[in-house]
């Protein structure tokens, strides 16, 4: 494909239909795209976007292109890549290196090819793969990289580890930690899209079943909330005692994974930690239990342990692999243990990704406007950026909010009670 590497350019019409559908439901991004088109803040610059390549992500890439950038897209997960959307992005002038179902070798090659024609001045990362690659293989060329932004909890964990050991050599904005990202994307987006994907893949009822949610961060909160809304009995497992109390006071059962293993019909991991479901847990699970992961990497459910537990994988339905033990019990893994909402579904709703990707677009602008003055560390997203996105979203929804009077502001800022 020359400047791109995709499956089939002939799929572009289908991809464009998907992009147009979500674009109509992303008013914040539409406004930012209009502002970028007028100001061209990225004229002459290269921006690399490494995210799940589906329709909402295409809108981010096209918005950055409106700002004058040469935009390259590559995937953060081979099973979430939608080949028709990739074809549409290429047809609309973006460089794309992504293949649905890419082998590990192809996946790595896509990342490297995305960097072949010169490192980007700015980049968006998801899970830290591009950040790690730049620091491992292109360290001597990092002086031209102004900075990047990170989309996920897992990626922030990796960045903080790099910062701690002195490896991080560029400013990185923690978009995942922005309020307009995690309060809505992580909670409502993951909560809805994870269960959408599970229901789509299994075509089984949730009501009356027991759902075990492993982890009670913002994503876990959303998954547990939606499971309860669908009629499930919900058990939460945690390692953080404060989050465990929070889950308990939110009305969920809280117990150890060893205690929950024989009780669950559905197990959904959302921790950012490896092997939170392992062979010892699998040995206790009931026949027919369904395992799904809503964390970034496919390491939360131990696939080596699952292979050792029983024969498999045997594909029994699109997106569902069965493993069978010697005693005849079966466990079912959805989406090969990868991020279930994209491996077996269409990802978060467009209205939610509208604010997340608005934060990414404005993060690129912030890095551009403050180039050379930012520390080489993990940087919080400025509160003013969050507030701007919120106000655009409220205006689009015809929702008004009050403002503090001068007297009220003075009262807030004083320690003297009049």
Image (tube, rainbow, N blue to C red):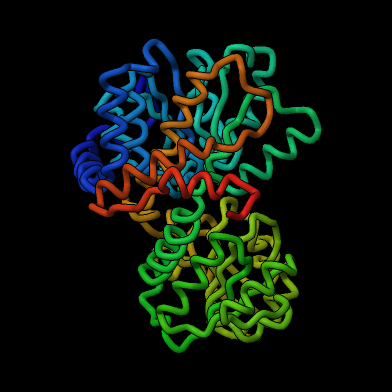
- Residue lying furthest front in this view? 418
Q: Quadrant of the N terminus?
A: top left
Q: Quadrant of the C terminus?
A: bottom right
- Residue at 47% from the left image edge and 50% from the top image edge: 408
The answer to whether 112 is drawn above or below residue 202 in the figure is above
Residue 165 rendering spot, x and y as whole percentages: 81, 33
Residue 157 rendering spot, x and y as whole percentages: 68, 45
Tell which of 173 and 322 is nearer to you.
Answer: 173
- Residue 43: in sight, yes or no? yes
Tell which of 385 and 126 is nearer to you.
Answer: 385
Residue 335 rendering spot, x and y as whole percentages: 48, 60
The answer to whether 8 is drawn above or below residue 250 in the figure is above
- Residue at 61% from the left image edge and 17% from the top image edge: 373
Residue 388 rendering spot, x and y as whole percentages: 39, 39
Quarter of the image where one finds residue 217: bottom right
Q: Is residue 66 left or right of residue 81?
A: left
Q: Is residue 391 left or right of residue 262?
A: left
- Residue 136: in sight, yes or no? no
- Residue lying furthest bottom in this view? 208
The answer to whether 271 is drawn above or below residue 61 in the figure is below
Tell which of 407 and 270 is nearer to you.
Answer: 407
- Residue at 61% from the left image edge and 66% from the top image edge: 216
Q: Is residue 277 left or right of residue 266?
A: right
| Number of marks present in the image shown | 0
Quarter of the image where one finds residue 200: bottom left
């Amino acid at each position: 494909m020359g400047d791109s590497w995709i499956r089939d350019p002939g799929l572009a019409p289908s991809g464009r239909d998907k992009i147009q559908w979500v674009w109509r439901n992303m008013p914040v991004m539409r406004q930012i795209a209009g502002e970028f088109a007028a100001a061209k803040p990225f004229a002459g610059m290269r921006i690399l976007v490494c995210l799940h390549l589906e329709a909402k992500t295409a809108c981010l890439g096209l918005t950055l292109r409106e700002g004058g950038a040469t935009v390259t897209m590559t995937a953060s997960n081979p099973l979430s890549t939608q080949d028709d959307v990739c074809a549409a992005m290429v047809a609309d002038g973006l460089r794309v290196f992504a293949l649905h179902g890419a082998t590990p070798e192809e996946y790595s090659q896509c990342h490297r090819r995305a960097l072949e024609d010169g490192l980007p001045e700015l980049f968006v990362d998801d899970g830290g793969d591009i950040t790690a690659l730049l620091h491992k293989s292109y360290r001597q060329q990092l002086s031209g990289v102004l900075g990047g932004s990170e989309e996920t909890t897992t990626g922030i964990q990796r960045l903080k580890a790099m910062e701690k050991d002195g490896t991080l050599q560029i400013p990185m904005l923690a978009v995942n930690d922005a309020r307009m990202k995690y309060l809505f994307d992580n909670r409502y987006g993951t909560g809805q899209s994870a269960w959408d994907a599970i229901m789509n893949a299994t075509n089984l009822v949730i009501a009356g079943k027991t759902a075990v949610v492993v982890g009670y961060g913002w994503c876990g909160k959303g998954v547990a909330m939606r499971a309860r809304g669908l009629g499930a009995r919900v058990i939460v497992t945690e390692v953080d005692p404060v989050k465990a109390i929070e889950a308990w006071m939110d009305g969920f059962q809280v117990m150890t994974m060893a205690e929950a293993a024989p009780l669950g019909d559905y197990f959904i991991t959302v921790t950012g930690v490896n092997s939170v479901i392992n062979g010892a847990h699998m040995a206790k699970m009931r026949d027919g239990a369904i395992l799904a992961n809503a964390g970034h990497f496919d390491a939360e459910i131990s696939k080596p342990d699952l292979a050792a537990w029983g024969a498999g994988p045997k594909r029994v339905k699109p997106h569902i692999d069965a493993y069978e033990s010697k005693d005849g019990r079966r466990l079912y893994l959805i989406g090969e243990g990868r991020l279930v909402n994209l491996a077996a579904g269409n990802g978060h709703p467009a209205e939610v990704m509208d604010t997340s990707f608005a934060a990414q677009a404005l993060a690129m602008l912030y890095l551009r406007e403050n180039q050379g003055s930012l520390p080489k560390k993990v940087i919080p997203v400025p509160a003013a950026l969050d507030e701007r996105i919120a106000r655009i979203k409220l205006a689009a929804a015809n929702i008004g909010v009050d403002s503090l009077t001068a007297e009220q502001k003075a009262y807030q800022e004083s320690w003297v009670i009049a």
